[in-house]
Image (cartoon, rainbow, N blue to C red):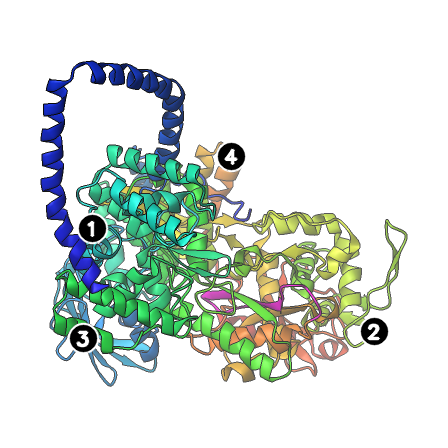
């Protein structure tokens, strides 16, 4: 191979001399015999006329085709997508592990002394961080050195050497989580020519197309030689295509190898060269060429291939890795290093020899490179981003909220809400959690989704749509529409609590068998989880233990239509059937929709549309758009506050009571489990003061999965929150709601000194009217003073 | 799909600097005058105090977008801080986003002491916003609530 390459190089020189001689000869002949050429000219003019008449429209059509392909895929500077910048200040809750994860995600290197921007050093719980200069959403900040100390998972000391304005509050430059073309649907990892290793640029030409710099799209000689070889062999053995032709072929990928197709490709190659310059064509080639297959997704471009095979950015590849990829151009599946390692190695070394023989590498460099292993990772990394599910959401929100003319501009800077450390924990919670469930005997086909949102701002901190990290064939967090089961129940009780005259937390409700003839004639008779009915029980107990029959009774009173209206008010626009089974969650919603509903509740009725993007900037730093924080308050927030209290009791004493053990933490949090028929879906919704998260576990084929809310999704949820700071739910009630001492079973006011006295929140005018016998025994005066005492102690 | 509550018209907020004296004369000044001494301030972290100071500076120079940005950062640190929420309400009043002014003032009242100066600012903001939203009786009612901030005991603890 090396020999052959050398000969073809030397031939180039010879060729030029020959062409010059031939041209001279032609001129002489033309001068001597004017008659024959004249006739030939006429014939050729005729042919030309015919050619133009028939061929011109054809060529024009091809021109339109190839230009629209090229322009449509012309890869300008991609838009950069940033995570949220980490704010550091004294009092900030963050563990050592999380801070290290954040630094790593933002590409900080650990080095003693933290001399360079983008490096840090750590000594126990003391960090020395050298922040890079960065243009944030609201302006540029210079590089700065920060010293900080952590203690008990929070920042206890922070000093910066930067401008005074930043003392006490420093933002780190954010992790770059993806570069995308907002209007294209594929996850490509695109590269600009300046960032491509020199050896790849020269090596590609040495191996695939040595005339690239000089030809006009096709090299007839190579085509002729290839045709000859193919005719001799009786089959296709040689390509003879230029890089330009290969690019064209790649645009219209087809296995067809007819002559017409070849001619079309050649014409289009010439047209491409006519319209665009070599660097544009080469850049397109590098970003476009087919280099492998992963399931139904094709791997296009060297940038993406570099991540797919080596899990490294293209610019960091070693010599032998570049050679391997260049070798794969000839047959991505034939030389696939994972499937055909031996053949791939052989091909790689062949390419390295060409690099050597054409002077791109020295002999010793070739030998060293050849001695190296393939260096391919075991598992392919999928998706251009480490967080493809989240980036998917970013794309959708951009398309929804921005004009496509804005998104077409090159090199936008997109600021998002992702917290890399929390995203990592969330993915681990799903991946590790499902592995764990499998070990406990649940099916191997289990899939999961997890959404983590900041309560007050609705900012999405983490989004997991697949059990496998980095995979995003199906983004379950956004697209898995599943029945939500008991997760709907709190909304029914919320509706009830809004009727101050009829309901409060201790209103007796009937948990007893219920039968209903449905529209299709069938009879619907829901039963409780344990097939027992409890009779008359306080409303709080019905919710806390998630009794189906009691819920259906309350549901009939409040009305299915109102329930559907409530779902809309909570920010979800999905098709919800107005049938009785809706009362028990026969409603299909996606995890993100469920999160939206519960964000509204967790924020005390101040609904905020969930968002993954906070701002978009042009490359010049001009704000294209900001998404400001907007509050959408619900009516009757008093009922929301009472419901939130009830949801804490689900965790304290109800269906989610194992949660504290799973978390190893007794902090007051709110939650609700959900299971659907035949254990197909497992849901858990839970919130702390500042985070709301929804976990779903089930099978993609919707077959029974053996899951319940507490055995599967709650474990995943807990695995996430074990890594996060947990702040207790704020039980301060809004105006018009007060804590009152009552006796739940007697549905009556009582006194803290009476037996069975509990303190529960009541909306004004919803308190029970009767009093317990115990309270009657206390004289009126004494009672008053006790009330006063209670108020004063809590003021 | 989802996210029905599209972030409507949040792009480029109108920068017309309307009567910011309205905020001063009808909200801040009277509330401060009435309250003289009656105020419980929530504890703010130094980081939040710093961002608040920056927001105030930006507000003084008329860059209300920048001021909003600072307050949003502060709210990420202390999302339920009544002073931050009220400050945001007053910024919304100045950019004539009366519905949001109303919403933030209510949120501030819900999370706040419901007494003293901040309570008075809450209700005065609500009153002014309602007036602009042509809810005259609501505006009057809010005005009356503002005056009660100085003599009602805090409730609901």
For marks 1 and 3 on the same chain, the one whose residue lies earlier in the sequence? 1
User: Numbered disc 4: what chain?
Assistant: B
Asked if one can make out residue A197 in the rendered structure from this viewpoint, the answer is no
Residue at figure coordinates x 21%, y 44% from the top left: A279
What residue does disc 3 label? A367
Judge the density around disc 3: few (<14), some (14-19), many (≥20) Cα neighbours within 10 Å.
some
Residue A726, compared with residue B22, is above or below; it is below
User: Numbered disc 1: what chain?
Assistant: A
The residue range painted magenta reads A684-704
Residue at figure coordinates x 24%, y 42% from the top left: A280
Q: Is residue A720 left or right of residue A624?
A: right
- Quarter of the image that includes the N terminus of chain A: bottom left
Q: Quadrant of residue B116?
A: bottom left
Q: CA distance from mark 1 to mark 4?
A: 78 Å
Query: Mark 2 or 4, which is nearer the eye?
Result: 2
Q: Which mark is residue B102?
A: none
Q: Which mark is residue A533?
A: 2
Badge 2 vs badge 4, beta-carbon distance below 8 Å = no
Query: Mark 4 or 3, which is nearer the eye?
Result: 3
Residue A153, compared with residue A324, is above or below; it is below
What residue does disc 4 label? B135
Q: Are marks 2 and 4 on the same chain?
A: no
User: Numbered disc 2: what chain?
Assistant: A
Rendered location of residue A725, percent (x, y): 41, 75
Q: Main secondary structure of the magenta part?
A: strand
For marks 2 and 3 on the same chain, the one whose residue lies earlier in the sequence? 3
Query: Is residue A737 part of the magenta span, yes or no?
Result: no
């Amino acid at each position: 191979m090396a020999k052959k390459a050398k000969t073809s190089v030397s031939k180039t020189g010879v060729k030029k001399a020959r062409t010059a001689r031939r041209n001279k000869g032609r001129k002489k002949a033309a001068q001597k015999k004017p008659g024959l050429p004249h006739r030939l000219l006429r014939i050729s003019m005729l042919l030309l006329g015919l050619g133009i008449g028939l061929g011109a429209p054809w060529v024009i059509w091809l021109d339109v085709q190839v230009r629209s392909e090229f322009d449509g895929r012309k890869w300008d500077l991609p838009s950069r997508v940033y995570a949220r910048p980490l704010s550091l200040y004294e009092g900030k809750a963050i563990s050592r592990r999380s801070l290290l994860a954040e630094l790593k995600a933002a590409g900080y290197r650990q080095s003693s002394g933290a001399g360079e921007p983008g490096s840090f050093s750590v000594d126990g719980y003391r960090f020395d961080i050298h922040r890079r200069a960065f243009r944030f959403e609201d302006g540029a900040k210079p590089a700065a050195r920060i010293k900080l100390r952590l203690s008990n998972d929070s920042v206890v000391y922070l000093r910066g050497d930067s401008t005074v304005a930043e003392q006490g509050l420093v933002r780190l430059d954010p992790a770059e989580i993806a570069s995308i073309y907002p209007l294209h649907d594929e996850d490509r990892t695109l590269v600009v020519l300046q960032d491509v290793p020199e050896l790849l640029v020269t090596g590609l030409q040495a191996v695939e197309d040595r005339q690239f710099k000089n030809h006009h799209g096709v090299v007839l000689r190579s085509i002729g030689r290839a045709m000859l070889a193919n005719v001799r062999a009786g089959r296709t053995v040689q390509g003879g295509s230029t890089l330009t032709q290969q690019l064209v072929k790649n645009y219209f990928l087809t296995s067809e190898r007819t002559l017409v197709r070849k001619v079309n490709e050649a014409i289009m190659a010439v047209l491409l060269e006519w319209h665009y310059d070599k660097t544009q064509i080469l850049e397109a080639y590098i970003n476009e060429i087919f280099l492998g297959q992963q399931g139904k997704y094709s791997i296009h471009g060297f940038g993406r291939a570099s991540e797919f095979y080596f899990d490294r950015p293209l610019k960091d590849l070693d010599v032998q890795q570049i050679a391997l990829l260049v070798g794969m151009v000839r047959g991505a599946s034939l030389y696939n290093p994972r499937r055909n390692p031996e053949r791939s190695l052989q091909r790689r070394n062949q390419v390295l020899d060409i690099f050597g023989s054409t002077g791109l590498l020295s002999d010793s460099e070739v030998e060293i490179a050849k001695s190296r292993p393939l260096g391919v990772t075991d598992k392919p990394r999928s998706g251009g981003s480490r967080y493809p599910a989240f980036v998917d959401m970013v794309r959708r929100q951009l398309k929804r909220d921005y004009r496509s003319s804005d998104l077409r501009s090159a090199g936008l800077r997109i600021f998002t809400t992702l917290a890399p450390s929390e995203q990592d924990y969330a993915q681990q919670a799903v991946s590790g959690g499902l592995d764990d469930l499998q070990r406990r005997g649940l099916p191997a086909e289990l899939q999961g989704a997890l959404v983590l949102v900041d309560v007050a701002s609705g900012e999405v901190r983490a989004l997991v749509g697949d059990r496998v990290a980095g995979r995003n064939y199906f983004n379950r967090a956004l697209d898995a529409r599943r029945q939500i089961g008991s997760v709907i129940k709190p909304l029914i009780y919320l509706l009830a609590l809004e009727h101050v005259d009829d309901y409060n937390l201790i209103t007796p409700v009937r948990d007893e068998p219920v039968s209903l003839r449905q529209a299709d004639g069938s009879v619907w008779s829901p039963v409780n989880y344990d097939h027992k009915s409890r009779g008359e029980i306080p409303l709080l107990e019905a919710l806390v233990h998630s009794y189906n029959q009691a819920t259906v009774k309350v549901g009939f009173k409040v009305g299915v239509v109102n329930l559907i209206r409530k779902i809309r008010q909570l920010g979800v626009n999905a098709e919800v059937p107005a049938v009785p089974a809706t009362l028990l969650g026969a409603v299909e919603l996606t995890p993100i929709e469920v999160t939206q509903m519960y964000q509204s509740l967790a924020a005390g009725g101040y609904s905020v549309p969930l968002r993954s993007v906070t701002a978009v900037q042009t490359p010049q730093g001009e704000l294209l758009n900001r998404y400001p924080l907007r509050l959408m308050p619900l009516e009757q927030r008093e009922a929301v506050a009472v419901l939130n209290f009830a949801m804490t009791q689900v965790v304290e004493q109800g269906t989610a009571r194992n949660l504290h053990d799973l978390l190893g933490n007794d902090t007051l949090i709110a939650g609700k489990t959900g299971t659907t028929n035949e254990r197909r879906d497992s849901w858990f919704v839970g919130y702390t003061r500042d985070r709301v998260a929804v976990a779903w576990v089930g099978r993609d084929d919707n077959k029974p999965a053996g899951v319940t809310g507490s055995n599967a999704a709650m474990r995943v949820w807990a695995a996430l929150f074990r890594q996060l700071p947990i702040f207790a739910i704020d039980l301060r009630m809004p105006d018009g709601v007060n804590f009152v001492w009552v006796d739940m079973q007697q549905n009556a006011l009582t006194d803290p000194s009476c037996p069975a006295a509990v303190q529960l929140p009541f909306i004004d005018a919803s308190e029970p009217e009767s009093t317990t016998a115990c309270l009657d025994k206390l004289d009126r005066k004494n009672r008053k003073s006790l009330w006063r005492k209670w108020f004063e102690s809590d003021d | 799909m989802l996210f029905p509550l599209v972030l409507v018209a949040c792009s480029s907020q109108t920068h017309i600097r309307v009567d910011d004296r309205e905020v001063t004369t009808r909200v801040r000044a009277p509330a401060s005058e009435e309250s003289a001494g009656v105020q419980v301030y929530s504890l703010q972290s130094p980081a939040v105090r710093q961002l608040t100071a920056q927001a105030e500076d930006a507000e003084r120079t008329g860059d209300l977008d920048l001021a909003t940005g600072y307050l949003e950062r502060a709210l990420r640190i202390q999302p339920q801080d009544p002073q931050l929420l009220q400050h945001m309400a007053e910024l919304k009043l100045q950019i004539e986003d009366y519905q949001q002014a109303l919403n933030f003032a209510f949120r501030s009242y819900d999370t706040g002491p419901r007494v003293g100066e901040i309570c008075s600012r809450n209700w005065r903001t609500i009153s002014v916003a309602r007036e602009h939203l042509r809810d005259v009786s609501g505006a009057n009612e809010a005005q009356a609530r503002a005056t009660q901030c100085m003599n009602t005991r805090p409730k609901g603890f």
